[in-house]
Image (spheres, rainbow, N blue to C red):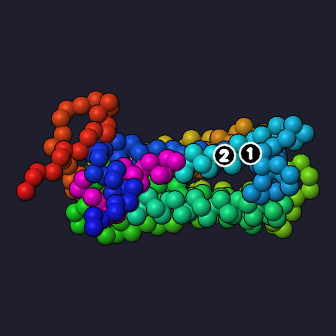
Amino acid sequence: MPKTLNPLELIARSCQPSARFVRRAALATVVMAVIIVVTGGAVRLSQSGLGCSTWPRCTPDSLTPTAAMGVNGLIEFGNRMLTYVLCAVVGLFIIAARARSPRRRSLTRLGWAQFWIVMGNAVVGGITVLTGLNPYIVASHFLLATALLTVAVVTWRRACEGDEEPRDLVARPVRQLAWVLLGATAALTLVGTLVTGTGPHAGDARKVHRIPLDWQEVTQAHVDLVYIVVGLTVALWFTLRAVKAPEAPRRAVRDLVVFLLLQGVVGYVQYFFGLPELVVGLHMLGSTLVWIAALRVVLAMRDRGPLPELPEQPSGDAEAVRPAEPAAAG
């Protein structure tokens, strides 16, 4: 009796995505993870956090927002619908990675990790609504979105490199400094969620429970961590120059310096102008770019060789997916 093939196996036998297509699919998951963070911030900043009063339905009697709910209902419901777009992009990457030969199990595992984080965060998002925007649940919702972004960046990096044993490009103390920098950036992000939980943008025009901490003190702690991250970045940049490190890690640190400077400008503008919603939204976008840059610094400290490539014809984007060659008879 012939063996029944699962859908992924059927796709793998019928088409062969190019390495470029897999890389672009991986990059698309990073872009969507950033969009989810930014649009989630837009929901909060537009006071649409409870635009849909319940979950998984929008109202007890309707799956979609009603006219009486106004623009807040549309914004909240639109953010929910983006989860389906995100799932589709992650699914596309999983299929492309599974169909690509030679098969790389590390990529498909990372793709499935993204999928399950999305599913878990969808549930946390529902709990956020059902608890009336509890600030601790809101913070967990953001941190899970950051976890998704982390896995997406690692996936993108793995899609651009080979599967050889990692070869260190710099000495161990330099790598340790890079990890300390990443830890400080993670702490900066974590304290940023406390700033959100104590600040004025609660996510809804009605009275919403806030984290019982002094907003100005938490903000000052956030600023102190910014100085620490900037100091570690500058130290790492000079260290890499002193040891004559390869171009890849030096370029990654330069990118982080640029994003930190831009984020610092946005941060001071939002503070001195009373936290205008648009500038706060830009600050949230900047936080995702800083985190991506910090991750790339750590990932640039080692090399895993070139991609395992199949012989490919020089082609444009139209050949991103091409039919697989038939197996030889025998």
Residue 296 sits in quarter? bottom left
The amino acid pointed to by label 2 is Met
User: Most prominent secondary structure in the magenta stretch?
Assistant: helix
The answer to which of 92 and 179 lies nearer the viewer is 92
Judge whether residue 251 can be spotted in this image.
Answer: no
- Taking the image as shown, residue 53 lies to the left or right of residue 227, namely right
- Percent of width and height locating residue 266: 65, 41
Q: Residue at x 78, y 54 (%)?
A: 57
The amino acid pointed to by label 1 is Phe
- Percent of width and height locating residue 313: 18, 35
The answer to which of 57 and 183 lies nearer the viewer is 57
Assign a secondary structure to mark 2: helix
In what quadrant of the picture does the N terminus appear?
Answer: bottom left
Judge whether residue 308 can be spotted in this image.
Answer: yes
- Taking the image as shown, residue 290 lies to the left or right of residue 97, namely right
Q: Is residue 106 magenta?
A: yes
The part of the chain drawn in magenta is 88-107
Disc assigned to residue 10: none
- Taking the image as shown, residue 324 lies to the left or right of residue 120, namely left
Say if mark 2 contacts mark 1, CB within 8 Å.
yes
Disc assigned to residue 77: 1
How many residues crowd mark 1 within 10 Å: few (<14), some (14–19), many (20+)?
A: many
Disc assigned to residue 81: 2
Q: Residue at x 63, y 45 (%)?
A: 82
- Percent of width and height locating residue 6: 38, 60
